[in-house]
Amino acid sequence: MYSTNRNSSDRTQQNSNPSTSSSLPQRLFTRREVIPARNDVLWRIERGAVRTLTWSEDGTFITLGYWGPGDLIGYPLSCVKPYQIECLTSVEVSVVPPHMWHQDVDALVSHIQQAEELLSIVHRKPISLRLWQFLVWLSEKFGRDVEQGKLIDLNVTHQEMAEVLNTTRVTVTRLLQQFEEEATMIRNKRRIIIRPINNNSNNGLRK
């Protein structure tokens, strides 16, 4: 239903040049920590996952993207205000100064492509298709193959999914239960496994 040829391992290979990554300053952040607002550097994620977000006047969070190993993030890449980078796991980043940004063209292009992919998903209808394709997107970016399918190795709460997809937590919970009943999704503790849908091409299309 939805696929992408880019995944975290591809981007890590593209951007783990020993002559650059290993020689750059490293920073460590803990889960839920906010990466400092700096306009003079980009951060290359070496390990972990973050989300970028903003919020409206009434305090509603608006998720702008999810990012993992190999991705470049930072305040110079956005004109959205306010803008925040929140760590979803423990995170290790390299500090990339401006004079080296031109060496990361692939990562910059990937940043644009991923932002557009997520934007296209957010506008899909019905909401069930929107949620399903978001789960598939997460499985391609943060997933790993297991016996039952592809496990999303990232804990994204129902509320966070709702913030991404412009819906309610109740709707997300109901649809996830529907996917479980259709046997296209399995819960493994706090993780989600996306199952192959060869015989279930209509998954995610019901309202």
Image (tube, rainbow, N blue to C red):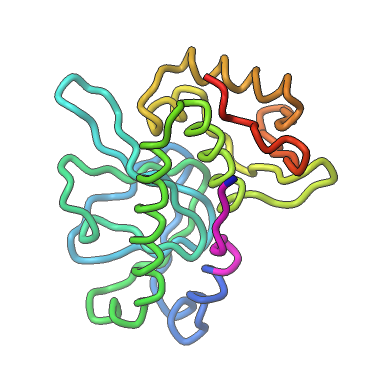
x%, y% of residue 24? 40, 75
Q: Nearer the viewer, residue 95 or 150?
A: 150
- Is 195 colored magenta in this rendering? no
Q: Residue lying at the far right in this picture: please name it.
A: 147
Q: In this rendering, would 57 be left or right of 167? A: left
x%, y% of residue 180? 71, 23
Residue at (46% x, 76% y) in the render: 21
Q: In this rendering, would 62 be left or right of 15? A: left
Q: Is residue 162 above or below residue 133?
A: above
Q: Quadrant of the N terminus?
A: top right
x%, y% of residue 142? 59, 50
Which corner quadrant of the image does residue 166 belong to?
Answer: top left
- Is 4 colored magenta in this rendering? yes
Q: Which residues are magenta?
A: 2-10
Q: Nearer the viewer, residue 201 or 79?
A: 201
Q: Which secondary structure is most common in the magenta stretch?
A: loop
Which corner quadrant of the image does residue 82 belong to?
Answer: top left
